[in-house]
Amino acid sequence: MLTTLLAAVLSVASAQETLELGRLTDDDISVVQKTLYPKEGRTEFGVHLGVMPFDAFLVTPNLQVSFDKHSSDRFSIGALVGVGYGLQNVTSRTLGSPTYGVVPYAYRYLGSALVGFQAAPIYAKMNLNGARVVHFDVYFAGRGGVSLERSIVPDGSFAVAPTLSPGIGSRFFLGPNTALRVELRDDVLLERRALTDKWAIKQNAGVTVGITMFSKVEGRP
Amino acid sequence: MIALLSLAFAGTFDDWSKATTTEAKLDALFTVLNDEALAEDHGMAWSHLGEVLEGEKLEGAAMIAWGRAFAAQVPDHAVEAVALADQVGDHNVVAEGLAELEKLSIDAKDAKSHVAYVVARDLLRRDKLGPTLDWLKKVDGDSPDFADAESVRGIVLANQGKNEAALVPLQTARALGVTLNKGERFDTKLLMNLARVYYGAGNWGQSIYHFKQVPRDSEYWAEAHFEEAWAHFRGADMAGTLGLLHSHGSPFMEGLWFPEADMLRAQSLFMMCKFGTAVEEMDRFEKRYQPIEESLDAALSGLDAKGTWAELEQYLDGGSTKIPGLLLRPYRTQDRVEEARAAVKHYRTEAGELSALGKHADTVKGWLDERADTLVEREGSRVLTRLKRDRDEVHQMLTDLELARIDILQLESRLYERAAATGVMEDIQADRIGKLRELRKKKGYEVWPFEGEYWADELGWYQVDSRSDCPESLARKIGG
């Protein structure tokens, strides 16, 4: 039985190898395409609008300004500065209404300044219904810095919190020098809270969408 | 007798100069032209006739009259005639006569250069290479036409087989084109010509370099890509040839006429002993081109130059044609066709606007109709000749396929004998990954594996990395 099986496997393998002989297969062909949207050596400046919708008590619209220097098509270092204002959501307002009279001890985002890196191992393209090919990359970001927050309870105490911010994002190239950048990031803050006099960990997870501009490359439009 | 004739003309000339109406002027001039005894004065009469017709804004008729004056060695109005020809799109009507002139009496350098360039270009179109070079010498180095003139000089020299000599004027033209901001189309044409001249000179590397610079969005790109493949083939780079021709096998190129590309691909596969794929390629060729050859043959039977022109016009206007559209497609962007269409339209329109000429309207209408018919005949005939050549070439290719199949059959059996003796030991998958890794090292490039799917933006970026399957003895046989 084993001998029969082995013979069958060998004959299949042999047939496959024979097929390669005298033939040009798809495996012999590669697409080596000049990078349409090179990033290496370019500076990227962007303005982004964002929202932090996942907090239990606050919804925070924000504006971020980014600056990145790409040392290669795959890696960059940069800075991200943002401002925003956490608005009380329905839960928060309900709790604060005369019915409950409770103001949750939440901190609202006011601003942040982060520096870090981006690694973009994925470069891909998609076909939009046969009408257009859109090139995009996917990057992972690791940043660190500080965030400024303020308590929503009447004491109004501020917190300047060390922040770690992992993120994942994508650039959809709109033209040789512009891209639409979408990013999901999660700021992890270590906050000293005045009322309770305790250290607390807080997450500001948010989504931003922005337009970025690249510095021009010599010899390209 | 001579004195009598001169007197007669002087009298008629007086009539002409004193005449106040167009019809009266024409009466006087036609009297001279219709009198064979005054043949010596016909040139001047044609020249004056041109003046009258131009005064009536009858550009086509004026050009015809002046063209006849030039042929009779009356050089007046050469600049005006060429300016009208630029406007109407028919240079030949004046250039043929100008080419006969012994001397151009034009003082302004630029105007003289332009006339000389127009005459030279027309001579080139009529395959008169020697006279073309003579007229190009009259183009001044500082004139705006010098870049075009140098381009024409390069083409003439290349046509004379002097490829090395052709490079200098072509390079000069290209440099001037940039300085004078003559646009991308001019530059691309020169790139194509330079690449072809290098090819003719057997300098495959430079030929490839220049073909590669043709922009992807240019109307010449597919042609450049195909001809670049030929340069690789001649340089014995079969993998390079196949990589380039892979684009021509894509669905995006189905509307283009490149039967030679398919044959070249089959030939390259053959040279690499990829007999299986070569046979498939041949089958595909036969399946695709047999019906085209048949329909082309049917369309061309009984078709004359006029009919061909009508077919071409119908195609260009978006109508359906008996001639397969992919053969007419190249004429969409051909300057000659565009100019001829504009000129024919102009002549036909002008033929309906001759009321100011009174009783002479019919005569002038006859000239205009005849000129339009000549253009139709000339261009139609040129297109028809080319179509017949295309048909014959495809026919020959289809015939050759049968012979190639027999060759392949014999060579393939030897290939398998070799394989049976040596085995195929390579780890194909490992080889593939290794190849991709190597390619990815290329800076500024993205590498994608080809999985049988064609993307429009990937055209022209294919690379084939495959070893020849020829055993040594077979390679010697194939290599000749």
Image (cartoon, helix red, strand yellow):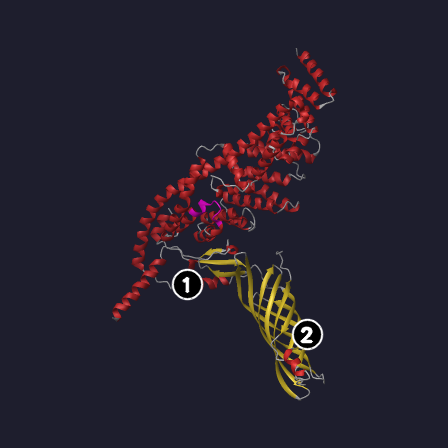
Residue A4, by quadrant, is: bottom left
Q: Residue at x 44, y 64 (%)?
A: B434
Q: Residue at x 55, y 65 (%)?
A: A137
Foreground: B348 or B158?
A: B348
Residue B17 is situated, as x and y percent measured from the top left of the image, at 73, 21
Residue situated furthest top in the rendering = B1
Quick one: quadrant of the N terminus of chain B? top right
Residue B476 seen anywhere in this rendered image of the structure: yes
Q: Is residue B429 left or right of residue A168?
A: left
Q: Residue at x 66, y 46 (%)?
A: B179
B420 w.r.t. B79: above or below: below
Foreground: A122 or B429?
A: A122
Residue B479 is situated, as x and y percent measured from the top left of the image, at 38, 48
Foreground: B105 or A171?
A: A171
Q: Is residue A23 magenta?
A: no
Label 1: which secondary element: helix
Q: Chain of mark 1?
A: B
Contact, CB < 8 Å: mark 1 with mark 2? Answer: no
Q: Is residue B87 left or right of residue B457?
A: right
Label 1 neighbourhood size at 10 Å, few (<14), some (14-19), many (20+)? few
Q: Is residue B257 magenta?
A: yes
Residue B260, by quadrant, is: top left
Residue A161 seen anywhere in this rendered image of the structure: no
Label 2: which secondary element: strand
What type is the residue that disc 1 sits on? Asp
Q: Mark 1 vs mark 2: same chain? A: no
Q: Which residue is mark 2?
A: A84
The magenta region covers B253-262
Q: Which residue is mark 1?
A: B431
